[in-house]
Image (cartoon, helix red, strand yellow):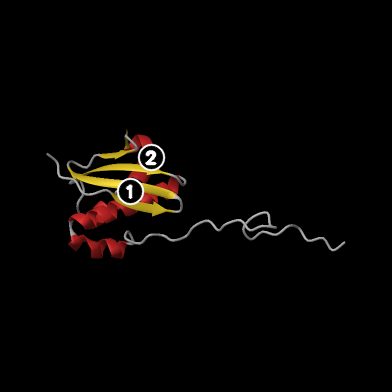
Amino acid sequence: MATSTPIKVGRRKTAVARVQLMTGTGKVTINRKDAIDFLKSEGHLKDIMQPFAVTGTDGTYDVRVNVNGGGFRGQIDAIKLGIARSLVEINEELKPPLRKGGFMTRDPRMVERKKYGRPKARKRFQFSKR
């Protein structure tokens, strides 16, 4: 039986990724699809696997991800954060290299809300003198 970690959440903008790691061979499943089918690019897959590369745990864990909301890039960053948090849950000694690589920080930037009397958050209607 494969041991698994509790589900860890990664967020970026409005994307939410629930990540669970299990001891295995490095298989990645995102929304019940193989990772390469979901991501459509080898570069994006490498991007998601960066926390494993930094900690030297390539191919030791199977990853199961459920991600929704946000855009494509936000989902990728949310998955990365979730994987990093799961790795720290497994082994606390992995936290310094992940922190140094910038994988443990939740990016707080969000879309600014639209204000009343304006077309967008900060844009103003065209000024007419006459």
2 relative position to 63: left or right? left
Q: Amino acid at mark 2?
A: Leu
Give whichever of discs 2 and 1 has the lower sequence position: 2
Query: Residue 13: percent from the left, percent from the top?
Result: 45, 53
Which residue occupies the foreground of this view, 77 or 70? 70
Observer-nearest of 50 and 3 = 3
Q: Quadrant of the C terminus?
A: bottom right
Q: Are marks 2 and 1 in contact (CB under 8 Å)?
A: yes
Residue closer to the observer: 9 or 24: 9
Mark 2 lies on residue: 39
Query: Which image quadrant for residue 106?
Result: bottom left
Task: Specify the quadrant that holds the N terminus.
Answer: top left
- CA gap, disc 2 to disc 1? 10 Å
The dot on residue 91 is none
Which residue of the protein is positioned furthest toward the front in this rendering?
A: 116
- The answer to which quarter of the image holds residue 94 is bottom left
Q: Is residue 90 visible?
A: yes
| Residue wearing tag 1 | 48
- The structure residue drawn at horizontal position 27% and vertical position 48%, both measured from the top left corner, is 7
Amino acid type, label 1: Ile
Q: Position of residue 88 (x, y in %)?
A: 23, 58
Q: Is residue 47 visible?
A: no
Circle 2 packing at 10 Å, graded few (<14), some (14-19), many (20+), is some
Is 99 located above or below residue 52 in the figure?
below
User: Could you tell me which secondary element the residue under label 2 belongs to?
Assistant: helix
In this rendering, position of residue 75 left or right of residue 8: right
Residue 119, how many percent across, how many down?
68, 54
Task: Give SS at disc 1.
Answer: helix
At x 33% / y 54%, what residue is drawn?
81
x, y (%) of residue 113? 57, 57
| Residue at the (47%, 46%) spot, across then down | 71
Q: Is the residue marked by circle 1 packed among few (<14), some (14-19), or many (20+) residues within 10 Å?
A: many
